[in-house]
């Protein structure tokens, strides 16, 4: 049985967008190992290193709504192209920075450029997929992301033991390569967003915030997303520094995570296609909370892998479902704006979650951190159970 049979019928443009995403994500290394680089190679204190992740998140917060508006105005294709190429160039320069101020400035610029890709990609894939196939388009991009993520962190773990500079350059090279692929893309499907911008009336980039469904969703989604992003900082310190596991083992956990997603995410979402958004998203949030919360009592290798499996199932339900919900409630011609605020939530969670998690780990200990994650995820679960209706989930 083909686990990806639900992706049949998507237009060629959707596959090109996903191919560029695959190339880009195959080099995803720097963010995952950023805290280890800042503490190990540059000698930053753990709290300062985690603040570097926060700086990246702040850039993502700023990039989200601005990029969303640019997508509606000029089209997501152009935004994706310049985002990938310019961010690759910026990333290649980050290893040249040494002091805290210089490093944080370089990370901020890189974030602004790199995070412009996220809302543009979401707007583009839901547009080219067309009515009735937006969820399949999201699933295809997610598949590309996770195939790439099964490669990047594992390779990054090996490069980190040899040279962090090589890790930065490899990540940068894949970003530029993905941008070049999109430069060669000749659209075949429906017109992309913003192609006829001259006939589109001006809409304030903040107008989406008048939609109570979007506001409630963003508020409910943020706490569990902060929990999810603990794998970017606190989890690395806990497993590598505190429990003594190697960087390569930490990278291998992401290979396990993405391997499960590649095999199971599409069929899992197909089987849940008629669930209400609120039910699917609440279940996903609960599993993410349980997976990270279980680290409070997990120290052995099998137990740690078990926690990854739990939160991976939560991720497979929560992340595709959240994008599908936002696409469902976005009015015609304003998908970029809605996706901008949606991806801004990732920036908020990324800016606050890893820093706060590291702070709790350093000052209150691992048990307090992981039980706190369980509590934050429970808050999201309860709020998502009361999510305003926006159609059925149909995430794939």
Image (cartoon, grey):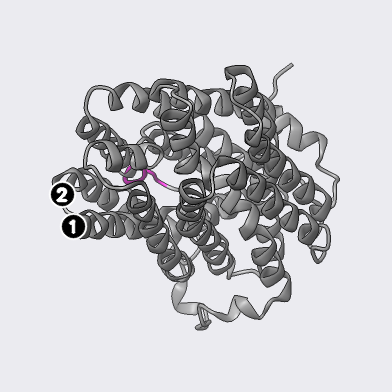
The residue depicted at 50 percent of the width and 46 percent of the height is: 361
- Residue designated by label 2: 98
Q: Which mark is residue 102?
A: 1
Image quarter of residue 258? top right
- Region of the chain picked out in magenta, as a range: 182-186
* Element class at badge 2: loop
Q: In the image, is residue 116 above or below residue 395?
A: below
Residue 23 disc label: none
User: Where does the image place residue 304, in percent across and percent down from the top left?
Assistant: 60, 25
Please tell me whether residue 204 belongs to the stretch shown in magenta.
Answer: no
Residue 296 quadrant:
top right
Q: Position of residue 105 (x, y in %)?
A: 24, 60
Q: Is residue 366 left or right of residue 57?
A: right
The residues tagged by marks 2 and 1 sit, at their Cα atoms, a distance apart of 6 Å
| Count of numbered labels shown in the rendering | 2
Q: Nearer the viewer, residue 318 or 57?
A: 57
- Dominant SS type (magenta): loop
Dot 1, how many residues are within 10 Å of its Cα: few (below 14), some (14-19), or many (20+)? few
Counting from the top left corner in percent of width and height, residue 205 is at 50, 77
Q: Is residue 331 above or below residue 87?
A: below
Using the rendered image of the protein, determine whether residue 99 is visible from the camera's viewpoint.
yes
95 sits to left or right of 24: left
């Amino acid at each position: 049985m083909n686990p990806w049979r639900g992706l049949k019928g998507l237009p060629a443009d959707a596959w090109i967008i996903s191919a560029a995403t695959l190339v880009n994500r195959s080099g995803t290394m720097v963010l995952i190992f950023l805290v280890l680089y800042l503490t190990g190679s540059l000698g930053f204190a753990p709290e300062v290193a985690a603040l570097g992740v926060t700086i990246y998140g702040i850039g993502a917060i700023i990039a989200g709504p601005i990029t969303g508006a640019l997508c509606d105005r000029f089209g997501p294709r152009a935004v994706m192209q310049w985002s990938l190429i310019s961010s690759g160039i910026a990333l290649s320069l980050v290893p040249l920075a040494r002091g805290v101020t210089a490093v944080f400035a370089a990370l901020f610029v890189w974030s602004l450029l790199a995070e412009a890709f996220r809302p543009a990609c979401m707007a583009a894939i839901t547009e080219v997929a067309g009515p009735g196939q937006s969820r399949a388009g999201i699933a295809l991009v997610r598949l590309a992301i996770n195939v790439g993520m099964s490669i990047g962190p594992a390779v990054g773990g090996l490069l980190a033991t040899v040279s962090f500079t090589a890790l930065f350059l490899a990540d940068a090279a894949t970003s530029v390569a993905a941008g070049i692929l999109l430069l060669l893309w000749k659209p075949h499907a429906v017109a992309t967003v913003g192609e006829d911008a001259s006939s589109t009336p001006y809409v304030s980039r903040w107008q989406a915030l008048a939609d109570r469904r979007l506001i409630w969703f963003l508020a409910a989604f943020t706490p569990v997303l902060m929990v999810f992003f603990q794998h970017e900082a606190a989890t690395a310190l806990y497993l590598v520094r505190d429990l003594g596991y190697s960087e390569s083992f930490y990278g291998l956990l992401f290979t396990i995570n993405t391997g499960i997603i590649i095999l199971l995410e599409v069929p899992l979402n197909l089987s849940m296609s008629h669930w209400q958004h609120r039910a699917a998203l609440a279940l996903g949030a609960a599993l993410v909370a349980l997976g990270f919360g279980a680290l409070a009592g997990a120290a052995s290798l099998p137990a740690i892998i078990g926690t990854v499996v739990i939160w991976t199932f939560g991720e497979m339900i929560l992340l595709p479902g959240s994008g599908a919900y936002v696409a469902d409630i976005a009015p015609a011609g304003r998908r970029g704006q809605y996706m901008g605020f949606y991806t801004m939530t990732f920036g908020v969670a990324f800016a606050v979650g890893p820093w706060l998690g590291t702070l709790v780990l350093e000052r209150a200990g691992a048990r307090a951190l992981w039980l706190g994650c369980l509590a934050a995820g429970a808050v999201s679960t309860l709020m998502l159970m009361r999510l305003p209706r926006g159609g059925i989930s149909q995430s794939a």
